[in-house]
Image (cartoon, rainbow, N blue to C red):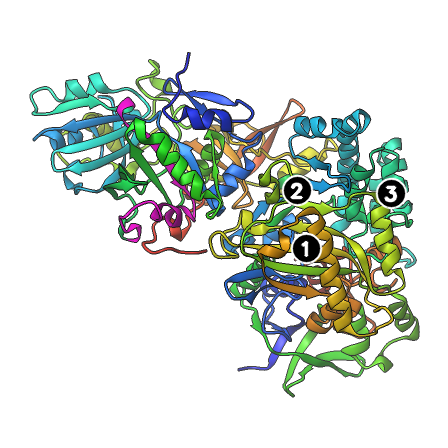
Amino acid sequence: MARHTPLHPRTGPLCRGSRWEEWSGFLAATMYELDHVHEYHAVRNGCALFDVSPLLKFDIRGSDAAALVDRVIVRDATKLRVGQVVYATWCDDDGMVIDDGTVARLAEDHFRMTAAVPIIGWLEDGGIGLDVQIEDVSEEIAGVSVQGPTSRDLLQRLTPHDLSSLGFFRCVRTDVAGVPALISRTGYTGDLGYEVFVDPTDAVHVWDSIMALGGDHQLLPAGTVALDLARLEGGLLLKDADYISSFQTVFPVQKTSPFELGLEWMVDLDKGFFIGQKALRREKERGSRWLTVGLHLDVVRMEAFYGEWGMPLSLPQRPWADEVPIYADAKQTRHIGRGTSGSWSPVLKKYVVIARLKPEHAGLGSQVFIEEMIEAVSYSVPATVVAMPFFDPPRKRARATVTS
Amino acid sequence: MTNTFDAIVVGGGHNGLTCAAYLARAGKSVLVLEKRHVLGGAAVTEEIFPGFQFTVYSYVVSLLRPEVIRELELPKHGLQIHPIDSVWAPTEDGDYVVFPTDPAQERDELKRHSLRDAEMMPQFNAMMYKMAHAVKPILGYIPPDPSRQNWRDLQTTRELAKQVGGLDKRTFRELTKLMTMSVDDFLAEYFETDVIRATTGLSGIIGTMLGVRSPGTAYVLLHHYMGELDGAYTAWGAQKGGTGAISEAIASAARSYGAEIKVNAPVKEVIIKNGAAVGVATEQGEEFLADTVVSGCDPRVTFRTLVDEKELPSDLLAAIDNFKFRGSSGKVNLALDRLPTFTAMPDPSLMNGSMAISPSVEYIERAYDDAKYGGVSRRPAMEVEIPTTVDPTMAPPGKHVMSIFVQYASYHSSESRDPDVDRQALGDAVIDTLSEFAPDLQDVILHKQVLTPWDMEHKIGMTEGNIFQGELTLDQLFFFRPATGYADYSTPIQNYYQCGSGTHPGGGVTAGPGRLAAKAILGGKL
């Protein structure tokens, strides 16, 4: 039976439809209202408040902390400055992705990783012979995430730290609503936003303090469906949708490398040894099986297909996660990949899909065909390969408040 | 600066801008001339009171054509629409009705009033959905002239007949009723609860000088069901930053294709030589020349103000004189210090949606009675939104703006014949009536803007203050809009075209007329 997060006393009564799902062993609200739509628009328009307490958090301390982190992630961790956070992925010996998450350097000798796959044992193995202490602090730290254009204005009213000086992917220890907190300018929405980590006993107080100001900043509590839609627009990968952790499948065909997931930009093959380095070097030489890209679907063609049945166009209003066949040709003779998650994007007014394609078909502007089932008949909807993120507002990275 | 262009668009309303954007996109050099300091026509946002952005006239959006959003890439230019999807309406005995978006929730709520109506609502919605789907293709056609015996007109007429002929019997029957009945008679076939009928029927009289019991109003209801933002019919929403931001997005698209847009440039007249438009002259005495001149103004202005009437055939002039404008709607915009309290509202989050003052069918019909002979309703029907509940860009944190659409305010004033008296009467009627349902309203008002149809005519040039550039009754739609023979955006004057809401598919922030006019001008290909 999934457990309650420290914020359940608040989220429980708010979750009107009792629509929960399991997240790392905890109950997480999929939506507080009976539909995710308002919560999603809060992310893009005002701000949304998420309970992110179920995030797994691993602390790595000690004089060799940087060395261990550098050993396990594909990025160069030694360059990370105190107060800096990076998005990173970590791989198994075969160079296949275990998980992706954030890595923060909280002090010279103190790192924190957030994750979705438990890796304590794996970290300990990696730390053999190093001066490190590894600790699972998942349940010792509760978290809320405030995401959206008004998040800075709201949060600024609760903290003495000048948030206009806190850059994108930076974190700071300060107070929020009078209690000690770690504010991290990160999130999973592709928008301006902050994650606030506090002691579980302070979590309800922080939640209440944020909610009390919510009316002034168009804030809504939001669940995982709104989050999923926002992350998709933001071009952020979702485990179990866009890839399967190599720790959670034994079949090589189901595993993916960082190159295949479109994360080549973060893989530093020339840094010191890291787990999976050898295999990734080999892959770099030989080429990858796949490339992960964005797709825009041709909804005009799609509407015509629905029209054949006398039906209006039907667009997915909630993100789907599936394996949808993609072909090089409309006749579906040459299979070239799969769509892994997708949705109609309300902010872009486009149907967007994250897809994993054979590299020769993954060039920007390439035309592919994705399957759409209508009345149990398979249709080929034309789609164009585009760059991700699909949605990337300047305010996400901007230093000062950008109002539009 | 050159003063010669391929095309000049008169009026920077949202349709004029749309037409300009498409023409520029097709490679034409285009100039838009707008008389006001701000773009958008009736789709404008203005800071009427310091710190408070008012979506002054047009205030919600649903009908904006998806092809325009897509083809002009409007999201890239700032289009961002958030949903306004619940409707709450108080009754006079202190009760209320809510129409939530969740079907199960809606059923539970309607059951409080009538089990029968609760069951009927999904059927009604499905029927409206089906009819909207059937009628929708018409929105994308340049209207044919069925009386003309040429291939294109006949072909289009046939295609349309096929479309409607393909409907099942029941839908066809309902569609026929919808085209002829009063909105209340139509709704009475579905619903027994007064406030449900009244509130659902409200969109049948918007912008129309007719009552809910007047035949012809049922179609106006359907018109409001044809929006398909995000691929779902009847999704209503509000643009971030107010409706003016939609006009700004279209203008930005137009500029990105190279169009030039001038504000504070009122056009005095279209210059005509040998029966053909060759340019325009502004009030300031400037002249701009072009191969094509397009008017985004309403039919009265297009045919009676901008051109010399001697250039036009008398049957067209007569048709334009008979075209019904009869502004019937007022608008009150309030800056609020905080949110008011609606006594009968069970959950303050309903203020994120729409609030309708439509307590009964008789209430609305009496509001019509009041204004029928001029003046304003003593207790008007209203549609109220507070966009700042979800949009942070329109007021300082914690403050709000309230948009109140008022039906009825007649263009023709009452005995006083004094616009100031009418404006005062409208403001008083609105605040007094709304205060019956929100007693603290007076206390929270920081600023008030009242607009009568007379004001709309004088501020933005819409004849008789009609918000649709002419009523949306069946006799003024499709190939009748604005006159038979000239529904294809052409005029009797060569190279002179029309692209305003007074042309097909009509009023509302649809951008449909602008797009179709550009299509007609470009010879059928965008």
Q: Which mark is residue A178?
A: none
Residue drawn at 88 percent across, 34 percent down? B189
Q: Which residues are magenta?
A: A139-164
Residue drawn at 55 percent across, 66 percent down? B49
Q: Which mark is residue B343?
A: 2
Residues flagged by tags 1 and 3 on a common chain: yes
Q: Is residue A156 left or right of residue B124?
A: left
The residue lying toward the viewer, choosing from A294 and A402, is: A402
How much space separates mark 2 and mark 3, taking CA atoms? 28 Å
Q: Is residue A323 magenta?
A: no
Q: Amino acid at mark 1?
A: Ile
Q: Which residue is mark 1?
A: B404
For label 2, the crowd category at 10 Å Cα-Cα, with few meaning under 14, some 14 to 19 and many 20 or more, is: some
User: Where is residue B326 drawn, in percent x and y?
Assistant: 84, 64
Residue drawn at 64 percent across, 68 percent down? B12
Residue B297 visible in the displayed image: no
Chain at tag 3:
B
